[in-house]
Amino acid sequence: MKRILTTLALACMTFFAVAQNSPFGMKMEIAEVGQDDNEYSIFTYQDPDGALGYYLGVGHEFDLLRIFGDDLSSSFSLVDETALVMGETMDDAFAFLDSLLELLEEAPGTTAAFPCRLTTGADQLFAPSTAHAVVVKRFLQAKRLSFLFESGGHTAEVDLTKSAIKSLRWNLELYRKLHPNG
C-alpha cells in the first residue's frame, strides 16, 4: 500500500510540475539533441515583461581540463552557446526549422544572419545579438550550417547538420502532440 501511495504522490508531483506555466527568466527545455561535441535544444523563455518566445540553443562543449587517474576520470568543460530566436509561437518554431532545412539546400558558401540572444550558463538570456550561418561542405561529410557568434569575448563556432534539425523537428512535433494547449 505504501508503494502505491508513494507512486501516486510522485506522479501527482510530476504532473503539477509539468503543468505549470513557464517561470520568468528561466529556460524551459522542449527538445534536445547532441551530436559530436555540439548540443542543440529547443526551449521557451519568458522575459520579466511577460513576452514568451521559442529559441533554438546551439552550443559547443569543450574540455578545459581533463584528469585521468587509476580510479578517477573527470573533466571540467565549458559550453559556448547562443539562442537563435525562433518566434513567439510553436508554428513560428516549425517555420524556422523548415527555413534552416531550406538553407541547407543552397550552395556551399551561402550565408544568412539570424537574430539571437547570448546565454549566461545560468539558463538566462542576455540582450539581442546576431549569429551568422554559412552553408559548408566538409570533406567526406554532408552539408551543414556553421554558426558563428560571440561568446565570452571570443568567436564561437557550432555546426548544425540536417539530421540534427530533423531530430529537433520530430521532437517538437512529439511535444505538440503531448501538450496540445501549450
Image: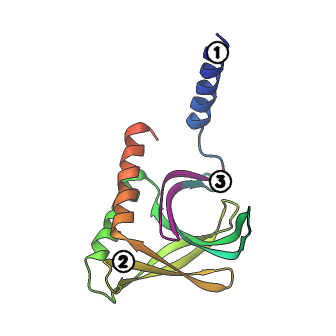
Are the two marked residues, 3 and 2, in contact with CB atoms closer than 8 angstroms? no
Q: Amino acid at mark 3?
A: Met
Q: Residue at x 38, y 44 (%)?
A: 174
Q: Label 3 to label 2, Cα distance in Å?
A: 30 Å
The disc placed on residue 144 is 2
Q: Position of residue 107 (x, y in %)?
A: 26, 85
Q: Earlier in the sequence, mark 1 or mark 2?
A: 1
- Of circles 3 and 1, the one toward us is 1
* Left or right: 50 as drawn, with respect to 66: left
Q: Residues within 10 Å of mark 1 (few under 14, many from 20)?
A: few
Q: Label 3 to label 1, Cα distance in Å?
A: 32 Å
The disc placed on residue 26 is 3
Q: Is residue 144 above or below residue 55?
A: below
Is the stretch drawn in magenta largely helix, strand or loop? strand
Q: Earlier in the sequence, mark 3 or mark 1?
A: 1
Q: Is residue 171 above or below residue 40?
A: above
The stretch drawn in magenta includes residue 34: yes
Q: Residue at x 26, y 81 (%)?
A: 106
* Left or right: 170 as drawn, with respect to 61: left
Q: Residue at x 54, y 52 (%)?
A: 29
